[in-house]
Image (cartoon, rainbow, N blue to C red):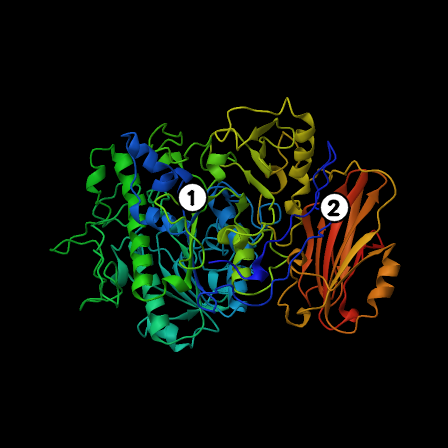
Amino acid sequence: MRRRDFLKAIGACAVCAVPGAMWAIGPEEQTTVRPGTAPNPAHGKKPNVILVLCDDLGWGDLGAFWQNKRADGNQPHIDTPNLDDAMRRGVMLTNAYTTSPVCAPARASMVSGKHQGNCNLRDNMFDRPVDARMTLGTVMKQAGYATWHIGKWGIGGGYESGTNGNGTQSGGQPRRSMACDAGFDYSYGYPAHAHGHSFYHWEGKEKGYDWRTQKQGSPLVENLSAQAKDDTFYAGLSLGATDWERDAEGNYWRRLISDAEVRHCYDTDLFTAKIKQLIKAHQDSGCEAPFFCYACYTTCHGAGQSGTQADPNLGSTTEFHIPGNAYPALSEDKEWGGGVTWEQDAEGHLPFRAVDAQGKATSNTYVYDEYKDYTTSQQRYASNVRRIDEALGDLLHFLKLRGLDKDTLFIFTSDNGPAGEYLSPGNITWVNDAFDSNGPFKGMKRWCYEGGLREPTFVLWPGTVPASGTETPRTSDFPFQFPAWMATLADVAGLPQPAHCDGVSLLPTLMGEGRQLPMRIYAEYQDGGSQQNFQFEQMVRDGDYVLIRNRGASGTVELYNVVEDEGQTQNLAASNPDRVRWMTDLLIACRVPCGKVPAACGALGSYWNDQHGTIDGMAMPATPLRGALPQLQVRVFRTGADAWPWVPNFRTLEPDAGFLAVDTVALRERLAKESGPFGLAVEGWIEADSEREVTFTASGAGGCQLWLHESHILEYEAGDCVAGRSITMKLAKGRHPYRLYLTAPKGFGDLCTVMAEGKSLA
């Protein structure tokens, strides 16, 4: 099925392609209109959305991506028949990147829509609070969705960021960004990072710790936002529980899920059953709002590794948890479709908990027959991956039986590359040829090479996203990162894509027609745990080329053509000095120094400023362009301005007017004639006569989004900048391009004033 005319793709933004120059975002002349209408021509309504995020699942762990090739060669392999079938009915995205090769920063980027150059949570800063002002949850909530988070969160604050024994917070990291603080109505799962280090819930009372403040154990917690607390739909999910308590640090309610409810239920099964319960209850209630489910499975993190989280009553206490029994068979029953269900027995237990006929725990013992000839670590790894395949096969089967499959956009991906320690317990070295979990790529978790950043990703939306119609899945090699999902879901929901977001909508790619906007791919990570002495790692992709720099600012760069050399075996840096020069500049130009980001949670001080050089203190490189400063390029947007929920990405809207202005005085004189709400996109240049610090300020009642080169240095929605905000950046001598988006909700008087060293930028 072809897309509507309004979904035709956007032309690529221009770039500065002078040899040796940084490729800066330039004039955005080709645009398109995206009206506020949901692109589901088959049904005329907004689709439900399920976004599955796995944990440490490698690009090569799925059959259609890599494992089927191993099977064809009679090598030990993992079978994923259900996910393979889903890929045949959808589209495989083979150039999907995370933003960081490790858990917490990758999840922060997914939720916030920011790559690591602009995100407030960087490095593996477990349980630090992500910026909750604009998230996947808040965007979908604005679009009228019921919003649910299931599984692992770990970016909410508290826990590992420091709590005192009496429950008060320490270390300046309050628990202020839990899922129900960040736009989700409902959350069920592990609140802390370390809580997900077991695939079996356990209150841990034997240890005497407080699940509200400490990271030990694996408590499952059910949360409700303050707005959803009195909704009868959500009250029914917890079966009339009365043990809710208000979190003193957040705007939500919470309750501990008791051992009696779910002990010995493997969490892949448990979370799938909860999602089915939510969907069934939502559909049976007759609720007209679509749902958005952010499903964060623990597959296939090395659960139980620490030896401190595991339930002592598991059937087996072996590290790296696996199921305790076979997955329940599917059926054609219209209510649940077989599989896992949320129907409790007379004793209150879920029927799929891992116990034998005598009630003895069998949890963490079940290995699939196909893998019993493998090594012990391979048995457990393969069984873990196979279980997520069965669980999601159950979920997709359930959607079809309930008549929801064509009304549901299903997205599957993982947070970072595979971790070698799961195949070699106690040793972080990758086990060569174990399963090729990193596919054909170099590297693994904690490495900014392709193996640490490429993720197994596909999309299924029957009747809307076209499939190949053959046994071979349709594939796309368009490169993109996690922030693209925020832009895509806003687009799907009929809202303008937020300028806040570093991504672009993937609808042209998913629909298979039109021209796709390009997206910058940037990743960084302060290495902790790879045992490779990488220290501060950075990666940027431009076209077919990837540049890697390890060991901080003075580290040697590596350049690869990852289309011709996907294994990154041929370092092309020495033979491509001009490309190396401008891509090295991009490593600085794509990021705001962490110390400049409001409420930043990341590597600061000596952690960044190591013996190999200071990253945060480096000057923003100038472009080599010379000559007279060009005129300001201006576009004015009026259509729909009275309904924008945020500053839109003006690249995706068609302007009502466009002109060149010789200076900001002339620009303001022309804009003063605007009597109603409008938006403004201005592109220009500033020039630094020497290397020095320049302070940028903004103040006003409207929204403001300012980019310097490709660094998003000021961003505020309407009403957030009345008192004024500022940021100081170190600039190299020379010319620096900027791009400025402004909104004036009530007219010209709301327009922010944005200055650089006292000179107006618009």
Label 1: which secondary element = loop
The amino acid on which the numbered mark 2 sits, given as a three-letter code, is: Met
**Residue drawn at the location 45% of the way across and 68% of the way down:** 185
Where 187 falls versus 687 (above or below)?
A: below
- The CA distance from mark 1 to mark 2 is 37 Å
Q: Earlier in the sequence, mark 1 or mark 2?
A: 1
**Residue at (82, 66) in percent of width and height:** 671
**Badge 1 amino acid:** Pro
Quickly name the residue at label 2: 729
State the residue in front, 10 or 252.
Answer: 10
Query: Eyeballing the image, is 557 above or below 602?
Result: above
Identify the residue position indicated by label 1 in the image: 456
Residue 692, x across and y down, in percent: 80, 41
- In the drawing, does residue 601 fall left or right of residue 186? right
Q: How many marks?
A: 2
Q: Residues within 10 Å of mark 1 (few under 14, many from 20)?
A: many
